[in-house]
Image (cartoon, helix red, strand yellow):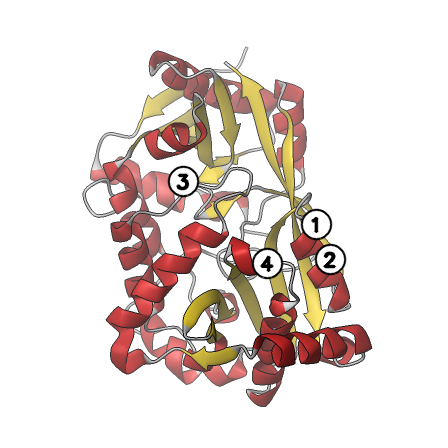
Amino acid sequence: MSNIKILKVESVNDLMTFIKFPWKIYKDNPYWVPPLIYDKKKILDKKKNPFFEHADMELFLAIKNGELAGRIAAIKNDLHNQYHNDKVGFFGFFECIDDQEVANMLFDTAKDWLKSKGLSAMRGPANPSSNDEYGMLLEGFDDEPRLLMPYNPKYYLELCENYGFKKAKDLYAYKIVYEKVIQSDKLRRVAEVARERSKIRISELNLKDFKRELEKVKYVYNKAWAPNWGFVPMTEKEIDALAKDLKPLVEPSLVLFGEIDGQLIGFSLVMLDYNQIFKTMNGKLFPFGFIKLFTHRKKITWVRILTLGIIPEYQRRGLDSVFYWEIIQRCHKLGINYGEASWILEDNEMMNRGAEVLNGELYKKYRIYETPI
């Protein structure tokens, strides 16, 4: 029997070992995008990440025959359980060699920790929540991930399913191509009718009044997405922290607000796919990576539609079509003709229908797994 040990991450050196382990897994994978080490350190820092004001987490490493073989996080998200009135724990940041025994020990360790916290199910991967990188790639392995989307080897699915994980929910990603969108007479027609009927006014982000604009985002975000499966409201501090991270990278013309009769009714956030730049940085932001973010920006050929939300009382009026039409035209003006709409719950009929009206191609799927504890 092989010699496998599970170690708790306790020191700064342990944390760096945890963060850098993926380089071992993906060293020969042409599609993997190395994460920024600086960014991962900040996400995992319990003192700096406001997520940990309502959550707890323990990190573990697996050593097999003296060699690093895997990693996992066990996550207790109190805000999730308060919001949904359940006792679900999460696993995240999972990486592992192709070895079922190692994977089983990692999953068992996370499960035992969650059980000790009084939780009754383990769901994931969540890195560390549904407001961050979420899910395990199920289909679409021959393409690089877009910004803030996960990527993993195909054998991870077997490691999860052999352990006993079952599907909890699938998440969809659609490929949007400008030439196909403008061929959609239905989108054009619905957008024109909705715009005329509602007299909706679309405005873009005003960076000079960023604080006020952020308040508008907070208003729409927790109102529009509240009914969705697995949704966890972001706290004020979490939204502030995310906004601080994204502000230097944001393209103001792709952050849109919708108003009707002076009332804010919707919001969309579209980001340039900086993964195309991150891939060349090998995890290092300083000293030259930071410069690349701006000097190579015009070479980006994709965007990702991170969020598009209409508050409930204004839904099912075709207003999402107005946002989509604005987004596609604005991206084309920037010279970008490819986009990804992600992630979308498999049973979110309104959003899936919207992607289909765009002539979008369902080209990637992600899975959330769950097992009782």
**Badge nearest the viewer, 1 or 3:** 1
Question: Which is more N-terminal, label 4 or label 1?
Answer: 4
User: In this rendering, does residue 140 appear at all?
Assistant: no
Question: Which residue is at 69% across, 64% downward?
Answer: 175
**Badge nearest the viewer, 4 or 3:** 4
Q: Mark 1 highlights which residue?
A: 349
State yes or no: discs 3 and 2 in contact (Cβ < 8 Å).
no
The image shows residue 38 at horizontal and vertical percentages of: 30, 56
The amino acid marked with disc number 2 is Arg
Question: Which is more N-terminal, label 3 or label 1?
Answer: 3
Q: Mark 4 highlights which residue?
A: 315
The image shows residue 114 at horizontal and vertical percentages of: 39, 19
Question: Which is more N-terminal, label 2 or label 3?
Answer: 3
Q: Mark 3 highlights which residue?
A: 128
Image height of 40 relative to 85, above or below:
below
The amino acid marked with disc number 1 is Glu
